[in-house]
Image (cartoon, rainbow, N blue to C red):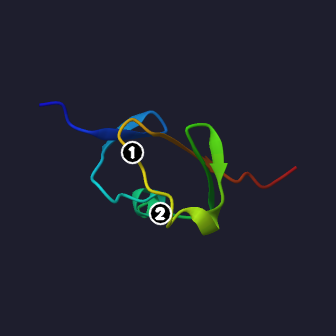
């Protein structure tokens, strides 16, 4: 049987019903910006943003400097 997955920066991750964007990102440290299927998701909306099989999540780390 094909495992249901989402993709995080090109890496397949297991999906389960009720998986939120916040839960998927929990292991990551530091401030990150996120996009779900190419659309920006603000940090305040991550807990309420539920993922579906096949979703593509992209994480960007802030770069400081000049």
Which numbered dot is residue 40? none
Mark 1 burial class by Cα count in 10 Å: few <14, some 14-19, many 20+: some
Q: How far across and down, in percent of the image, does residue 6 sit?
A: 38, 41
Q: Report whether 64 appears left or right of 42.
A: right
Q: Report whether 36 appears left or right of 62.
A: left
Residue highlighted by disc 2:
22
Residue 18: image quadrant is bottom left
Judged from this view, the residue extending furthest toward the left is 1
User: Quick check: 55 above or below 22?
Assistant: above
Q: How far across and down, in percent of the image, does residue 15 sit?
A: 30, 47
Report the residue at 20% width, 36% height from top.
Answer: 3
Q: Secondary structure at mark 2?
A: helix
Q: Secondary structure at mark 1?
A: loop
Cβ–Cβ under 8 Å for marks 2 and 1: no
Q: Report whether 2 appears left or right of 36.
A: left
Residue 64: image quadrant is bottom right
Mark 2 burial class by Cα count in 10 Å: few <14, some 14-19, many 20+: some
Spatial CA span between label 2 and label 1: 14 Å
Q: How far across and down, in percent of the image, does residue 21 sit?
A: 47, 57
Foreground residue among 19 and 33: 19
- The tag earlier along the polypeptide, 2 or 1, is 2
How many tags in the picture? Answer: 2
Nearer the camera: disc 2 or disc 1: 1
Judged from this view, the residue extending furthest toward the right is 66
Residue highlighted by disc 1:
52
Quadrant of the image for the N terminus?
A: top left
Q: How far across and down, in percent of the image, does residue 37 sit?
A: 55, 38
């Amino acid at each position: 049987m094909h495992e249901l997955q989402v993709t995080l920066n090109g890496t397949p991750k297991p999906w389960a019903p009720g998986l939120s964007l916040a839960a998927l990102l929990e292991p990551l440290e530091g401030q990150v910006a996120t996009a779900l299927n190419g659309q920006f998701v603000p940090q305040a909306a991550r807990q309420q943003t539920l993922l579906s099989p096949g979703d593509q999540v992209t994480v960007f780390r802030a770069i400081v400097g000049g």
